[in-house]
Protein backbone atom coordinates (compact mmCIF):
# COMPACT_ATOMS: atom_id res chain seq x y z
CA UNK A 1 0.00 0.00 0.00
CA UNK A 2 1.51 3.35 -1.10
CA UNK A 3 1.74 6.22 1.35
CA UNK A 4 1.15 9.72 0.00
CA UNK A 5 0.30 13.08 1.54
CA UNK A 6 -3.36 13.95 1.74
CA UNK A 7 -5.09 17.23 2.61
CA UNK A 8 -6.29 17.64 6.18
CA UNK A 9 -10.10 17.91 6.37
CA UNK A 10 -9.96 20.54 9.16
CA UNK A 11 -7.86 23.69 9.47
CA UNK A 12 -5.60 24.33 12.44
CA UNK A 13 -6.95 26.72 15.05
CA UNK A 14 -5.20 30.11 15.06
CA UNK A 15 -3.23 30.80 18.24
CA UNK A 16 -1.30 33.80 19.52
CA UNK A 17 2.44 33.35 19.75
CA UNK A 18 4.03 33.87 23.20
CA UNK A 19 6.12 36.74 21.86
CA UNK A 20 2.94 38.78 21.36
CA UNK A 21 2.55 39.20 25.14
CA UNK A 22 6.04 40.66 25.53
CA UNK A 23 5.66 42.97 22.54
CA UNK A 24 4.64 46.61 22.56
CA UNK A 25 1.23 45.66 21.14
CA UNK A 26 0.20 44.01 24.41
CA UNK A 27 2.48 45.67 26.98
CA UNK A 28 1.64 49.27 26.11
CA UNK A 29 -2.08 48.51 25.83
CA UNK A 30 -2.17 46.82 29.23
CA UNK A 31 -0.22 49.64 30.85
CA UNK A 32 -2.81 52.06 29.50
CA UNK A 33 -5.65 49.93 30.87
CA UNK A 34 -4.03 49.75 34.31
CA UNK A 35 -3.47 53.49 34.28
CA UNK A 36 -7.16 53.94 33.45
CA UNK A 37 -8.24 51.52 36.22
CA UNK A 38 -6.61 53.54 39.03
CA UNK A 39 -8.64 56.79 38.74
CA UNK A 40 -11.86 54.81 38.22
CA UNK A 41 -11.37 52.93 41.45
CA UNK A 42 -10.26 56.09 43.27
CA UNK A 43 -13.43 57.88 42.17
CA UNK A 44 -15.69 55.02 43.28
CA UNK A 45 -13.77 54.61 46.55
CA UNK A 46 -14.40 58.23 47.50
CA UNK A 47 -18.05 58.12 46.42
CA UNK A 48 -18.82 54.84 48.26
CA UNK A 49 -16.60 55.21 51.32
CA UNK A 50 -19.12 53.40 53.53
CA UNK A 51 -18.74 50.13 51.63
CA UNK A 52 -15.85 47.67 52.02
CA UNK A 53 -12.93 48.77 49.78
CA UNK A 54 -12.49 45.39 48.13
CA UNK A 55 -16.21 45.16 47.34
CA UNK A 56 -15.99 48.51 45.56
CA UNK A 57 -12.91 47.32 43.66
CA UNK A 58 -14.66 44.16 42.48
CA UNK A 59 -17.50 46.27 41.11
CA UNK A 60 -15.07 48.43 39.14
CA UNK A 61 -13.11 45.35 38.04
CA UNK A 62 -16.18 43.68 36.56
CA UNK A 63 -17.61 46.87 35.05
CA UNK A 64 -14.44 47.29 32.98
CA UNK A 65 -14.47 43.67 31.81
CA UNK A 66 -11.30 42.62 33.61
CA UNK A 67 -12.94 39.35 34.72
CA UNK A 68 -12.82 38.17 31.09
CA UNK A 69 -9.02 38.42 31.04
CA UNK A 70 -8.57 34.71 31.83
CA UNK A 71 -10.50 33.80 28.68
CA UNK A 72 -7.97 35.52 26.43
CA UNK A 73 -5.60 32.55 25.93
CA UNK A 74 -6.06 28.78 26.29
CA UNK A 75 -2.82 27.41 24.84
CA UNK A 76 -0.51 26.35 27.70
CA UNK A 77 2.74 27.73 26.31
CA UNK A 78 1.22 31.09 25.36
CA UNK A 79 -0.86 31.28 28.55
CA UNK A 80 2.27 30.98 30.70
CA UNK A 81 3.85 33.98 28.98
CA UNK A 82 0.55 35.88 29.11
CA UNK A 83 0.12 35.44 32.89
CA UNK A 84 3.76 36.12 33.71
CA UNK A 85 3.74 39.36 31.74
CA UNK A 86 0.38 40.50 33.14
CA UNK A 87 1.37 39.89 36.77
CA UNK A 88 4.69 41.63 36.15
CA UNK A 89 2.94 44.75 34.83
CA UNK A 90 0.66 44.84 37.88
CA UNK A 91 3.69 44.54 40.15
CA UNK A 92 5.28 47.37 38.18
CA UNK A 93 2.57 49.70 39.46
CA UNK A 94 2.77 48.41 43.05
CA UNK A 95 6.32 49.57 43.70
CA UNK A 96 7.82 52.90 44.67
CA UNK A 97 7.78 55.73 43.64
CA UNK A 98 4.17 55.18 42.52
CA UNK A 99 1.54 57.00 44.66
CA UNK A 100 0.17 54.90 47.56
CA UNK A 101 -3.31 54.62 46.05
CA UNK A 102 -1.85 53.37 42.75
CA UNK A 103 0.19 50.79 44.66
CA UNK A 104 -2.91 49.57 46.50
CA UNK A 105 -4.96 49.37 43.30
CA UNK A 106 -2.25 47.33 41.59
CA UNK A 107 -2.06 45.00 44.62
CA UNK A 108 -5.84 44.47 44.59
CA UNK A 109 -5.73 43.73 40.86
CA UNK A 110 -2.83 41.32 41.37
CA UNK A 111 -4.71 39.44 44.08
CA UNK A 112 -7.97 39.36 42.11
CA UNK A 113 -6.37 38.07 38.95
CA UNK A 114 -4.34 35.43 40.81
CA UNK A 115 -7.17 34.13 43.00
CA UNK A 116 -9.68 33.90 40.13
CA UNK A 117 -7.62 31.62 37.90
CA UNK A 118 -10.00 28.92 36.57
CA UNK A 119 -9.58 25.55 38.28
CA UNK A 120 -11.10 22.17 37.41
CA UNK A 121 -11.97 23.12 33.84
CA UNK A 122 -12.29 20.65 30.98
CA UNK A 123 -9.93 20.78 29.22
CA UNK A 124 -7.67 21.97 32.00
CA UNK A 125 -6.19 25.47 31.78
CA UNK A 126 -2.59 26.19 32.76
CA UNK A 127 -2.39 28.10 36.06
CA UNK A 128 0.42 30.18 37.48
CA UNK A 129 1.53 28.92 40.89
CA UNK A 130 4.27 31.41 41.74
CA UNK A 131 4.70 35.08 40.83
CA UNK A 132 8.31 36.15 40.37
CA UNK A 133 9.34 39.35 42.14
CA UNK A 134 12.73 40.98 42.89
CA UNK A 135 13.61 40.79 46.57
CA UNK A 136 13.88 44.58 47.06
CA UNK A 137 10.43 45.09 45.57
CA UNK A 138 9.09 42.33 47.82
CA UNK A 139 10.34 44.14 50.92
CA UNK A 140 8.72 47.39 49.77
CA UNK A 141 5.46 45.55 49.19
CA UNK A 142 5.51 44.11 52.72
CA UNK A 143 5.78 47.65 54.11
CA UNK A 144 2.82 48.98 52.13
CA UNK A 145 0.28 48.64 54.96
CA UNK A 146 2.60 50.55 57.31
CA UNK A 147 2.98 53.27 54.67
CA UNK A 148 -0.79 53.71 54.48
CA UNK A 149 -1.30 54.17 58.21
CA UNK A 150 -1.92 57.79 59.12
CA UNK A 151 -2.88 58.79 55.56
CA UNK A 152 -6.24 59.63 54.00
CA UNK A 153 -6.57 56.08 52.72
CA UNK A 154 -5.72 54.34 55.98
CA UNK A 155 -9.04 52.49 55.71
CA UNK A 156 -7.35 50.30 53.09
CA UNK A 157 -4.81 48.95 55.59
CA UNK A 158 -6.87 45.87 56.69
CA UNK A 159 -7.47 44.87 53.07
CA UNK A 160 -3.79 45.27 52.18
CA UNK A 161 -2.72 43.30 55.26
CA UNK A 162 -5.09 40.46 54.40
CA UNK A 163 -3.79 40.21 50.82
CA UNK A 164 -0.15 40.24 51.91
CA UNK A 165 -0.82 37.50 54.49
CA UNK A 166 -2.66 35.47 51.84
CA UNK A 167 0.34 35.69 49.49
CA UNK A 168 2.70 34.73 52.28
CA UNK A 169 0.55 31.82 53.51
CA UNK A 170 0.25 30.29 50.03
CA UNK A 171 3.90 30.98 49.10
CA UNK A 172 2.82 32.89 46.03
CA UNK A 173 5.93 34.97 45.50
CA UNK A 174 9.12 33.48 44.05
CA UNK A 175 11.95 35.79 45.08
CA UNK A 176 14.54 36.90 42.56
CA UNK A 177 17.79 38.86 43.09
CA UNK A 178 17.76 42.62 43.43
CA UNK A 179 16.02 44.55 40.63
CA UNK A 180 19.25 46.42 39.85
CA UNK A 181 20.61 43.11 38.48
CA UNK A 182 17.68 42.78 36.04
CA UNK A 183 16.89 39.17 37.03
CA UNK A 184 13.53 38.96 35.23
CA UNK A 185 13.02 37.41 31.81
CA UNK A 186 12.77 39.31 29.55
CA UNK A 187 15.13 41.92 30.96
CA UNK A 188 12.72 44.76 30.19
CA UNK A 189 9.26 45.21 28.71
CA UNK A 190 8.36 45.51 25.93
CA UNK A 191 10.94 43.25 24.36
CA UNK A 192 9.58 43.36 20.81
CA UNK A 193 8.69 46.75 19.32
CA UNK A 194 5.95 46.82 16.71
CA UNK A 195 6.53 49.23 13.82
CA UNK A 196 3.75 50.00 11.37
CA UNK A 197 4.59 48.89 7.82
CA UNK A 198 3.08 52.08 6.45
CA UNK A 199 5.57 54.08 8.51
CA UNK A 200 8.46 52.01 7.16
CA UNK A 201 7.27 52.58 3.61
CA UNK A 202 7.04 56.34 4.15
CA UNK A 203 10.56 56.44 5.61
CA UNK A 204 12.04 54.32 2.81
CA UNK A 205 11.20 55.87 -0.58
CA UNK A 206 12.96 53.02 -2.43
CA UNK A 207 10.39 50.52 -1.12
CA UNK A 208 7.58 52.18 -3.10
CA UNK A 209 9.54 53.56 -6.06
CA UNK A 210 8.07 52.59 -9.41
CA UNK A 211 10.09 51.52 -12.41
CA UNK A 212 10.15 53.61 -15.55
CA UNK A 213 9.30 57.24 -16.07
CA UNK A 214 6.99 58.90 -13.56
CA UNK A 215 3.46 59.54 -14.77
CA UNK A 216 1.77 62.95 -14.72
CA UNK A 217 -0.12 61.90 -11.58
CA UNK A 218 3.15 60.92 -9.88
CA UNK A 219 4.66 64.30 -10.75
CA UNK A 220 1.60 66.15 -9.50
CA UNK A 221 1.54 64.12 -6.27
CA UNK A 222 5.26 64.76 -5.67
CA UNK A 223 4.86 68.47 -6.35
CA UNK A 224 1.89 68.69 -3.98
CA UNK A 225 3.88 66.90 -1.28
CA UNK A 226 6.75 69.38 -1.75
CA UNK A 227 4.37 72.34 -1.54
CA UNK A 228 2.77 70.96 1.62
CA UNK A 229 6.20 70.49 3.20
CA UNK A 230 7.14 74.04 2.26
CA UNK A 231 3.91 75.43 3.73
CA UNK A 232 4.41 73.53 6.98
CA UNK A 233 7.97 74.86 7.17
CA UNK A 234 6.74 78.41 6.55
CA UNK A 235 4.16 78.02 9.32
CA UNK A 236 6.92 77.11 11.77
CA UNK A 237 9.18 80.00 10.79
CA UNK A 238 8.74 83.60 11.79
CA UNK A 239 7.42 85.88 9.00
CA UNK A 240 9.90 88.38 7.62
CA UNK A 241 7.49 91.26 8.34
CA UNK A 242 7.86 90.68 12.06
CA UNK A 243 11.55 91.59 11.91
CA UNK A 244 12.49 95.21 12.43
CA UNK A 245 13.36 97.27 9.27
CA UNK A 246 16.75 98.16 10.74
CA UNK A 247 17.64 94.52 11.16
CA UNK A 248 16.45 93.65 7.64
CA UNK A 249 18.42 96.51 6.09
CA UNK A 250 21.49 95.48 8.06
CA UNK A 251 21.30 91.97 6.68
CA UNK A 252 20.87 93.30 3.14
CA UNK A 253 23.95 95.51 3.55
CA UNK A 254 25.93 92.56 4.89
CA UNK A 255 24.88 90.49 1.90
CA UNK A 256 25.93 93.21 -0.57
CA UNK A 257 29.29 93.58 1.15
CA UNK A 258 30.00 89.84 1.17
CA UNK A 259 28.94 89.55 -2.49
CA UNK A 260 31.26 92.35 -3.59
CA UNK A 261 34.14 90.80 -1.63
CA UNK A 262 33.48 87.46 -3.30
CA UNK A 263 33.42 88.95 -6.81
CA UNK A 264 36.67 90.80 -6.14
CA UNK A 265 38.33 87.66 -4.78
CA UNK A 266 37.48 85.54 -7.83
CA UNK A 267 37.74 88.33 -10.44
CA UNK A 268 34.11 87.74 -11.35
CA UNK A 269 33.82 90.98 -13.32
CA UNK A 270 36.45 89.91 -15.89
CA UNK A 271 34.96 87.83 -18.72
CA UNK A 272 38.15 85.80 -19.25
CA UNK A 273 38.72 84.83 -15.59
CA UNK A 274 38.00 81.49 -13.92
CA UNK A 275 35.71 83.26 -11.47
CA UNK A 276 33.52 84.52 -14.31
CA UNK A 277 33.33 80.96 -15.69
CA UNK A 278 32.22 79.69 -12.28
CA UNK A 279 29.49 82.37 -12.11
CA UNK A 280 28.21 81.31 -15.55
CA UNK A 281 28.04 77.66 -14.47
CA UNK A 282 26.20 78.62 -11.27
CA UNK A 283 23.66 80.61 -13.29
CA UNK A 284 23.10 77.67 -15.64
CA UNK A 285 22.65 75.25 -12.72
CA UNK A 286 20.06 77.48 -11.02
CA UNK A 287 18.15 77.91 -14.29
CA UNK A 288 18.17 74.15 -14.88
CA UNK A 289 16.78 73.42 -11.40
CA UNK A 290 14.05 76.04 -11.80
CA UNK A 291 13.05 74.55 -15.15
CA UNK A 292 12.81 71.10 -13.53
CA UNK A 293 10.53 72.49 -10.83
CA UNK A 294 8.41 74.22 -13.44
CA UNK A 295 8.03 70.90 -15.30
CA UNK A 296 6.47 69.33 -12.19
CA UNK A 297 3.83 72.05 -11.88
CA UNK A 298 3.22 73.35 -15.42
CA UNK A 299 -0.29 74.57 -14.55
CA UNK A 300 1.19 77.14 -12.16
CA UNK A 301 3.17 78.91 -14.90
CA UNK A 302 0.30 78.67 -17.39
CA UNK A 303 -1.91 80.77 -15.12
CA UNK A 304 0.58 83.70 -15.22
CA UNK A 305 0.51 86.45 -17.79
CA UNK A 306 3.45 87.01 -20.14
CA UNK A 307 4.59 90.08 -18.22
CA UNK A 308 4.48 88.17 -14.90
CA UNK A 309 6.49 85.27 -16.35
CA UNK A 310 9.19 87.65 -17.58
CA UNK A 311 9.45 89.58 -14.30
CA UNK A 312 9.54 86.61 -11.90
CA UNK A 313 10.59 82.97 -11.72
CA UNK A 314 12.25 81.25 -14.66
CA UNK A 315 11.63 84.17 -17.04
CA UNK A 316 13.48 86.59 -14.77
CA UNK A 317 16.45 84.21 -14.44
CA UNK A 318 16.60 83.69 -18.21
CA UNK A 319 16.65 87.47 -18.73
CA UNK A 320 19.39 87.80 -16.08
CA UNK A 321 21.50 85.22 -17.93
CA UNK A 322 21.08 87.19 -21.15
CA UNK A 323 22.42 90.26 -19.33
CA UNK A 324 25.32 88.14 -18.08
CA UNK A 325 26.14 87.00 -21.63
CA UNK A 326 26.19 90.63 -22.77
CA UNK A 327 28.53 91.56 -19.90
CA UNK A 328 26.02 93.92 -18.29
CA UNK A 329 26.07 92.31 -14.80
CA UNK A 330 26.65 89.05 -12.92
CA UNK A 331 23.32 87.38 -13.78
CA UNK A 332 21.37 86.02 -10.83
CA UNK A 333 23.88 87.57 -8.42
CA UNK A 334 22.63 90.95 -9.57
CA UNK A 335 18.89 90.37 -9.18
CA UNK A 336 18.74 92.88 -6.32
CA UNK A 337 20.37 95.47 -8.60
CA UNK A 338 17.74 94.91 -11.30
CA UNK A 339 19.40 92.20 -13.36
CA UNK A 340 16.94 90.60 -15.81
CA UNK A 341 14.29 93.23 -15.16
CA UNK A 342 12.70 94.24 -18.44
Image: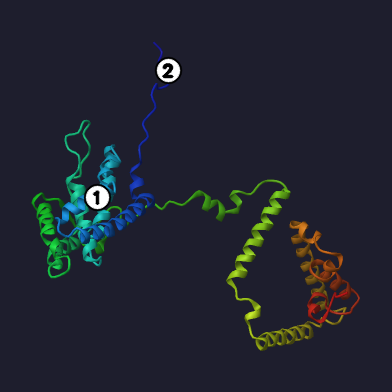
Q: Nearer the viewer, residue 243 or 186?
A: 243
Q: Is 201 placed above or below 178 here?
A: above
Q: Decide if residue 171 is on the left or right side of residue 314.
A: left
Task: For the C terminus, give its image quadrant.
Answer: bottom right
Q: Mark 2 or 1 closer to N-term?
A: 2
Q: Nearer the viewer, residue 47 or 238?
A: 47
Q: Would you identify the image quadrant in which residue 178 lies?
A: bottom left
Tag 2 residue: 4
The CA span between labels 2 and 1 is 54 Å
Residue plotted at (84% across, 77% down): 339
Q: Which label sits in the foreground, 2 or 1?
A: 1
Residue 260 on image: x %, y %: 77, 85
Residue 177 on image: x %, y %: 20, 59
Residue plotted at (76% across, 64% down): 290
| Mark sitting on residue 160 | none
Q: Badge 1 local density, few (<14 within 10 Å), some, or many (20+)?
A: some
Q: Nearer the viewer, residue 139 or 63?
A: 63
Q: Outermost residue, right direction?
A: 326
Residue 179 on image: x %, y %: 24, 62
Q: Badge 2 local density, few (<14 within 10 Å), some, or many (20+)?
A: few
| Mark sitting on residue 61 | 1
Query: Element type at marker 2?
Result: loop
Task: For the N terminus, give its image quadrant.
Answer: top left
Amino acid sequence: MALYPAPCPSHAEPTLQPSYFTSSLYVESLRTDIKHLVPLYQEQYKARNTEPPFSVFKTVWRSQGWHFLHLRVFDDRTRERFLNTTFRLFLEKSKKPEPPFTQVTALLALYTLYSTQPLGTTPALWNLKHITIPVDQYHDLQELDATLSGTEISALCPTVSFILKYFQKHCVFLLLPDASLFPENPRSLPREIHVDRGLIASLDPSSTKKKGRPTRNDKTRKAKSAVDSLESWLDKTQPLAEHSPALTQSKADDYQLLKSQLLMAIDGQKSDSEGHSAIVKANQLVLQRLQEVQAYVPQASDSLSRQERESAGVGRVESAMEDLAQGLNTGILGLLEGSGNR
